[in-house]
Amino acid sequence: MLWPGVALAQTGPLANDEAPKQKVISLFYNSINDNAGLYNGSEYIMYDQRIKGTPYFMDGGQQSGDVFYNGTLYANVSLIYETSSESVVVREFGQGVFITLVNEKINYFTLLGHTFIHLTPDSSNKVINDGFYDRLYNGTTAVYAKRQKTVYEDPRTFEKSFVENNHYFIYKNNTFYEVNGKNAVLNVFKTKKKEIAKYIRQNDISYRKDPENAIVKMAEYYDKLTH
């Protein structure tokens, strides 16, 4: 089989100007072999581009990242994360074909400096749903964000656009808690509630202005107080 843009190598000694070309071809085939386990999902179908905005995480589209897939870590591959459908998409090198990975086979992936963990609920943890969660902090406790984009249709203009909604979770003592405000976070850390409330007040940490930073700082301080 011939891949587009790749010629068959000639036998015998290579001319000086042919050596670099042969090296590129060799690297190409090595890349295909190294990542062959990734290219076994379904072809990715592009979203309806009449919708304003994008469904992608941080509107980033295609970026370099790592993915732990089906027991193997694939580093520095071309990734897309479509949060509206929770689709992790890879681009097959040299083909221009985008493939949606099988979510059940993904342990975690990294993208734009964020690490997304595949979490699955069990009988003792029904607060979360099966899916990918952005791990914001990982200490004795942990903080996760659920990144989601949904399509909103303006009732007056019928114009559709992607709207981002984030939900936050704290993992403490083998239990997940969903938090949607400063008091909810303080209640999770109720044994140190007064100390944490004083800490965020003295350090001008605002949940309203930056909930992610506030939750992480509160979790970090709780861990410092208790360990």
Image: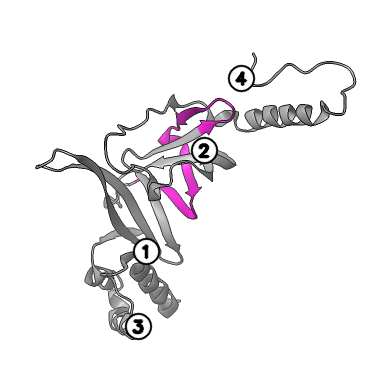
Mark nearer the viewer, 4 or 1: 4
The answer to whether 127 is drawn above or below residue 41 in the figure is below
Residue drawn at x 14%, y 43% is 154
Residue receiving disc 3: 199
Specify whether residue 112 is painted magenta.
Answer: yes
Q: For label 2, count other residues whose C-alpha is less than 10 Å away and answer few (under 14), some (14-19) or many (20+).
A: some
Task: Give the labeled residue for mark 2.
Answer: 69
* First along the sequence among labels 2 and 3: 2
SS for tag 3? helix
Which region shows up in magenta? 91-120
Task: Tell me the residue that label 1 is attached to.
Answer: 173
155 falls in the magenta region: no
For label 3, count other residues whose C-alpha is less than 10 Å away and answer few (under 14), some (14-19) or many (20+): some
What label sits on residue 4 in the rendered view? 4
Q: Total marks drawn?
A: 4
What amino acid type is highlighted by mark number 2? Tyr
Residue ID at (41%, 77%): 226
